[in-house]
Image (cartoon, helix red, strand yellow):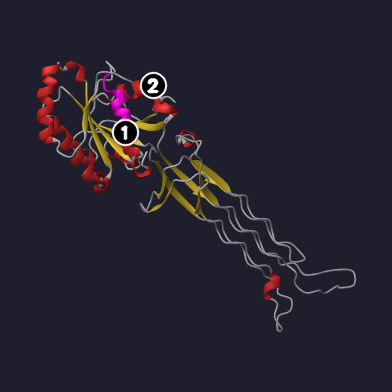
Amino acid sequence: MTEGNFVDYVKIHVSSGKGGQGSRHLRREKYIPKGGPDGGDGGRGGHIIVKANKNLWTLYHLKFKRHFKAEGGGAGGKQTSTGADGADVYIEVPLGTVIKNTDTGETYKELTEDGEELIIAQGGKGGMGNAHFKTSTNQTPRYAQPGLEGEEYNITLEMKVLADVGLVGFPNAGKSTLLSVVSAANPKIADYEFTTLKPNLGIVTHRDFQTFVMADIPGIIEGAAEGKGLGHYFLRHIERNSTLLFLIPADAKDIREQYDILLDELRRYNPELLDKDRLVAISKSDMLDAELKVEMKQELDKEFKGIPYLFISSVAQQGLQELKDVLWKMLNKENGS
């Protein structure tokens, strides 16, 4: 999937169908010239329904279709026959899509299971036919109800990437390179900030054909929680990851300081992110000789007490199997595997 085809945020306009008109029909047959009312009810207008589909990975299919309108219900007929319901309109979205009302900001639901549905605009109720209004004092009512209008809303669909491991780091920390080496993903890689403008997903193969999904998410800058840089655009994707892999380059001026800044941005955006499992990977460690690595390890042992870390190099392919082993163990600790 190319970067341009990855769409994780769209706004759409939806209109459900109007209910059908109730019938005012009076029974007229050969030997019953003045029968009573037998008008049926109008049919329900069509709903607008959002449905989760596990085979979708992006909202790209909605990029060029922003208006959805369901058909109205059919009118009631004679012999108290009810009009046909309007056809429902289904909008399929990937798992992890959050549905919001654009105008009020209200969040309706997040769809996380395949086939899960949410009616976002109810079809209008059909009007009652004149058969409902017959009384002992009014035996031939010549009126019926019109159908109720449908609902009309502006809706925002936000997709949160569903991945096991989320890569967290400043721009140019080597996240795209790591993903390209440990999976078959082919993210854009270059030596400048914000090469990655959209999340990239890669399936990482572990031992015995076991796999897990890793997401390369656009780099964090200070102030991201307030919307600076790509801000909230990418931070929402981290919410769905069960484990966070912090990638900090070995040539950073202060590794612990970078880690603290990244952690603080996540905390300011959503404090619940700090409850996720965390692992720190010191990338580009092929630049370190053995002596320098020993010195750095002694320093990191003091600064990262209780926080697991390891050295890796995506280019030299050093420490990658150990990294996958540790991540697999973290992802499957509840299963005891």
Rendering coords of residue 260 (x, y %): 15, 37
Q: Which residue is mark 2?
A: 186
Pick the residue in front: 36 or 237.
237
Span highlighted in magenta in the image: 318-326
Pick the residue in front: 59 or 312.
312
Reply above or below: 15 against 124. above
The three-letter amino acid code for the residue at tag 2 is: Asn
Q: Quadrant of residue 263?
A: top left
Q: Which residue is mark 1?
A: 327
Judge whether residue 294 is colored magenta.
no
The three-letter amino acid code for the residue at tag 1 is: Leu
What is the total number of numbered labels drawn onto the structure image? 2
Disc 2 residue crowd, few under 14, some 14–19, many 20+, Cα 10 Å: some
Relative horizontal placement of residue 306, taking residue 328 as reference (left or right)? left
- The main secondary structure of the magenta stretch is helix
Pick the residue in front: 320 or 128.
320
Q: Residue at x 63, y 67 (%)?
A: 145
What is the spatial separation of the Cα atoms under label 2 and label 1, in whole angstroms? 21 Å
Tag on residue 210?
Answer: none
Looking at the rendered image, the quarter that the N terminus falls into is top left
